Amino acid sequence: AQTVTQSQPEMSVQEAETVTLSCTYDTSENNYYLFWYKQPPSRQMILVIRQEAYKQQNATENRFSVNFQKAAKSFSLKISDSQLGDTAMYFCAFMNPNDYKLSFGAGTTVTVRA
Amino acid sequence: SQTIHQWPATLVQPVGSPLSLECTVEGTSNPNLYWYRQAAGRGLQLLFYSVGIGQISSEVPQNLSASRPQDRQFILSSKKLLLSDSGFYLCAWSSPAGTGNYEQYFGPGTRLTVT
């Protein structure tokens, strides 16, 4: 299994501010996929954003964007204009398309303050 | 659209009792199916995955087993539960190989407490 590291166990951000979550991974593959999932207190895992390794352009989904640095094996998530509903645990995940299995990081708990 | 169901939502079972958790997917055919376990405040650990009926791959040796009796049904079982089996169990599905879609979509989960 691939190793995915999220070095920030917890982060706090003021409403309407921006927060960036870090993620690094270890792989010898050239083709792979990266994801960010959100797990709110309900514990439902929700897909936030995906990035294909062969694409140089960083993915964006509304207020969520990533900074994908392939050479550095880094995949950070930026949440802009933070909202109270963004309070959740965020997981970075890696997939090798040859086996369809996800490897998850340990997660970062994000708390948005009013 | 596709939906994924899990039941029960919550379960409290004594040590040594059997377990059966069910997961079903609607709106897609021949999905890849997955069982994950999440300990409190932790990441997800892949337990089993299946690419077709009767095809089960186990990721970690443990007290659990999985079965796929129908195309869109995935069952997690145990003959005798241990205290260490407590956790939050998530089922997920993804499109089959060759579709170019790699996202996994998760069910609402089952919270299992073994007493």
Image (tube, coloured by chain):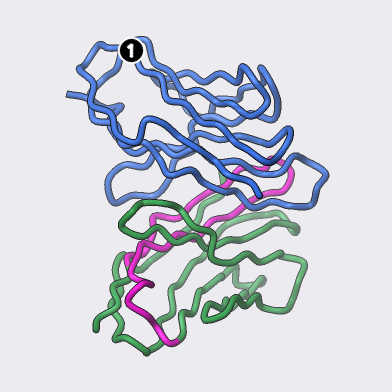
Chain colours: A green, B blue
Q: For the point 41% across and 31% down, which residue is it?
A: B7
- Picture quadrant of residue B69: top right
Membership of A83 in magenta stretch: yes
Q: Residue at x 39, y 36 (%)?
A: B89
Side (left or right) of A77 relative to B102? left
Residue at far left of view = B115
Q: Residue at x 53, y 29 (%)?
A: B48
Q: The C terminus of chain B appears in which quarter of the rendering?
A: top left
- As rendered, which of B75 and A31 lies closer to the eye? B75
Residue A12 vertical position relative to residue A38 in the rendered view, above or below: below
The percent position of residue A28, horizontal first and vertical second, equals 68, 54
> For residue B33, which quarter of the picture?
top right
**Amino acid tagged 1:** Pro
Horizontal and vertical percent for residue A92? 50, 60
Q: Which residue is mark 1?
A: B18
Chain for disc number 1: B
Q: Height in image: A89 above or below B81? A: below
Residue nearer the viewer, A55 or B80: B80
**Residue A30 in the image: x percent, y percent?**
74, 59
In the image, which residues are magenta? A81-109
User: Is residue B44 rendered magenta in the image?
Assistant: no
Q: SS class of the residue under badge 1?
A: loop
A69 left or right, relative to A20: right
